[in-house]
Amino acid sequence: MTKEDFLEGQLLLVDKPLGWSSFQAVNKLKWVIRKKFDLKKIKIGHAGTLDPLATGLLLICTGKFTKTISGLQGQIKEYTGTITLGATTPSYDLETAIDQTYPTEHITPSLIVETAKNFLGEITQRPPVFSALKKDGKRLYEYAREGKEVTIKTRVVTVSEFEIVKIELPNVYVRIVCSKGTYIRSIAHDFGEALNSGAHLSQLRRTKIGDYNVDNALDPLDFEEKMLGKA
């Protein structure tokens, strides 16, 4: 691809590594493109944040394609993940330590499958307090890290598929297809409550956004090597 291609606009499919923020992935690509073509600046942004502990598909737009970001954000998304039963965390995932444990002896595979049906269609969920949503101009996770109580509004989202892929208690492996704005962490937390236990999300991977598939995505470091050659 040429300098003009990137300035005119490209849609890049990136497989975000574990531990990277979405911002870091965007910055890596931005640095590579600027270095390759000796550019002072280039417009670049992503369509839909992934938490650092999640991996998978990140759509990154350059140049004039940044205008398409809001449309891309509205696409249906698919995730695979692991819900671990019997314990909760304040962040609903492994970003924070376990704060409470719960019994799981009563949970059977059939109960898990039946309970999953309650999460199909339009559901109401409360986003995690450890999230990048803003309230009064401040990120929710900033309030959480300061130990401040904050009221978070519930939101209605749509889950079109909730497949129980495998059960190896305490882990439940799932595939979820959902609308924009759905927090899989919140589904994991609420799923635990619905089972009269507790749960948190221990692994998450975004596999699809609309028609775009992570199978066609490139690791940011592979992108760097492809563009700049081996260091």
Image (cartoon, rainbow, N blue to C red):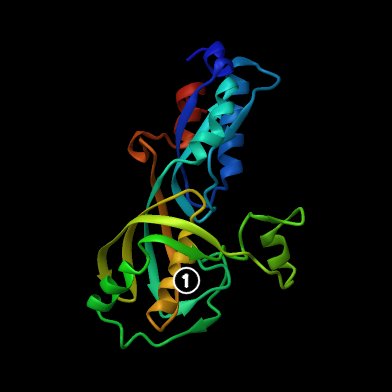
Q: Is residue 168 visible?
A: no
Image location (x, y in percent) of residue 212: 38, 35
Name the residue rendered at 66%, 17% in the picture: 39
The quarter of the picture where residue 83 lies is bottom left
Image location (x, y in percent) of residue 61: 54, 29
The quarter of the picture where residue 97 lies is bottom right
Q: Nearer the viewer, residue 226 or 201?
A: 201
Image location (x, y in percent) of residue 202: 43, 65
Label 1 element class: helix
For residue 196, above or below residue 120: below
For residue 201, above or below residue 73: below
Amino acid type at circle 1 is His
Image location (x, y in percent) of residue 117: 31, 67
The quarter of the picture where residue 163 lies is bottom left
Q: Which residue is mark 1?
A: 189
Name the residue rendered at 56%, 15% in the picture: 8
